[in-house]
Image: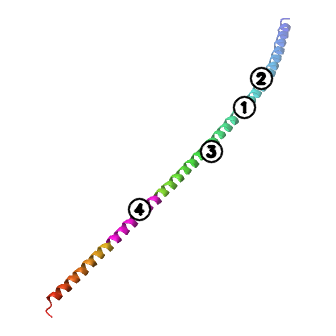
Amino acid sequence: MKFATFGLMLALVASCGLVACSNTGEALKKEGGEAVKQTGDALDKTGDAMQKDTNRAVQKTNEAAENAGQAVKKETEKAAQETKEAAKETGEAVQEAGDVVKKGTGEAVSNTGKALQNTGEKLQNNGETMKKETKENDPR
């Protein structure tokens, strides 16, 4: 009887062990499926967050590029305006210099003409004086 009881107990323990193993397998299967689902959900959320961050970064990059383009355009327009003003000032300076040269040249030509005229008058006076002196000194 002891062997029968022992056999019965052994059969009962084995049966419980099988049920426990079966339940453990089911629990592992259920928990594993849940873990896989949670991992998938987490990956989806990570992907969504990465997409939002990427979109935000692209938008910021586009804004920065546009701002840089506007800054370059503004500086180019400013440089063009400054160049135009410098060219105008240079033109005015050249015009003024030309006027000064023209005036100076005109005055120089005028002064040269006056000097030549004075020299001519002196030569004429000297010639008349020489003629007069020659007449006076000529015994004929």
Q: Quadrant of residue 95?
A: bottom left
* Left or right: 50 in relation to 80: right
* Left or right: 5 in relation to 137: right
Q: Residue at x 47, y 60 (%)?
A: 91
Q: Earlier in the sequence, mark 1 or mark 4?
A: 1
**Label 1 CA crowd tier, 10 Å (few <14, some 14–19, many 20+):** few
Task: Quarter of the image for the N terminus: give it.
Answer: top right
Which residue in the structure is indicated by mark 1? 43
Q: Residue at x 57, y 47 (%)?
A: 74
Q: Which amino acid type is shown beneath numbered disc 1?
A: Leu
Span of residues in magenta? 90-111
Mark 1 touching mark 4, by CB under 8 A?
Answer: no
- Which one is closest to the eye, mark 3 or mark 1? 3
Q: Residue at x 27, y 76 (%)?
A: 119
In the picture shown, does residue 88 fall above or below 125? above
Check residue 66 in the rendering and tell me which mark sits there, or answer none: 3
